[in-house]
Amino acid sequence: MHSLLLALATTPAPTPSPSLRPGLSQDQVTPGLLGFLLTAFIVVLTALLIVDMVRRIRRVRYRAQVEEERAAAAEAAALEGGPRTAGTGTPRLEDPAGRPATRPEANGDAGPGSR
C-alpha cells in the first residue's frame, strides 16, 4: 500500500490544457453559432410536436368517452324504452341533473369555454 502511494506521488501530472493540432483553430472544431441555432430549432420543433400530439390524443380520448356515453345511453334507452328525440330514433342524452347534455362540435372540440 505504501509503495502505491509513493508511485502515485512521483507520477508526473498530465498537461493542464490540451492543445489543438497545428493548423487548426478553435472555430474549426466547435459547432459555433450555426450549430447552436440548428440545435435550438430542433428542440423548439420537437416541443411543438409533443404539444400537438398531446392535444390530438386528448381529443381522441374525449371522442371515445362521448361515444361510450352515447352507446350506454342508447342501450339503456333500448332496455327501458326511455325518451327519444322526435323522429330521429336516437336516444336523448341528459346529464345527471336532467338537463340536455351538450354535444361536441363537428370537428371534435367540445365548444367554446371547454378545455
Image (cartoon, helix red, strand yellow):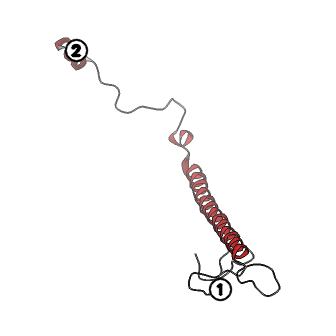
Q: Farthest residue toward the right?
A: 87
Q: 28 or 101: which is nearer to us? A: 101
Q: Nearer the viewer, residue 35 or 62?
A: 62
Q: Quadrant of the N terminus?
A: top left
Q: CA distance from mark 2 to mark 1?
A: 85 Å
> Residue 83: where, in percent of width, then height?
71, 84
SS for dot 1: loop
Image: 108 above or below 20? below
Q: Amino acid at mark 1?
A: Pro
Could you tell me residue 5's position as x and y percent?
A: 20, 17
Examine the rendered structure and indicate whether residue 59 appears above or below residue 111: above
Upstream in the sequence, badge 2 or badge 1? 2
For label 2, the residue is 4
Residue 10, image x and y in percent?
23, 17
Q: Residues within 10 Å of mark 2 (few under 14, many from 20)?
A: few
**Observer-nearest residue: 83 or 57?**
83
Q: Which residue is mark 1?
A: 100
**Callout 1 crowding tier (Cα within 10 Å): few <14, some 14–19, many ≥20:** few
Front-lying residue, 105 or 70: 70
Residue visible at 68% across and 68% down in the picture = 63
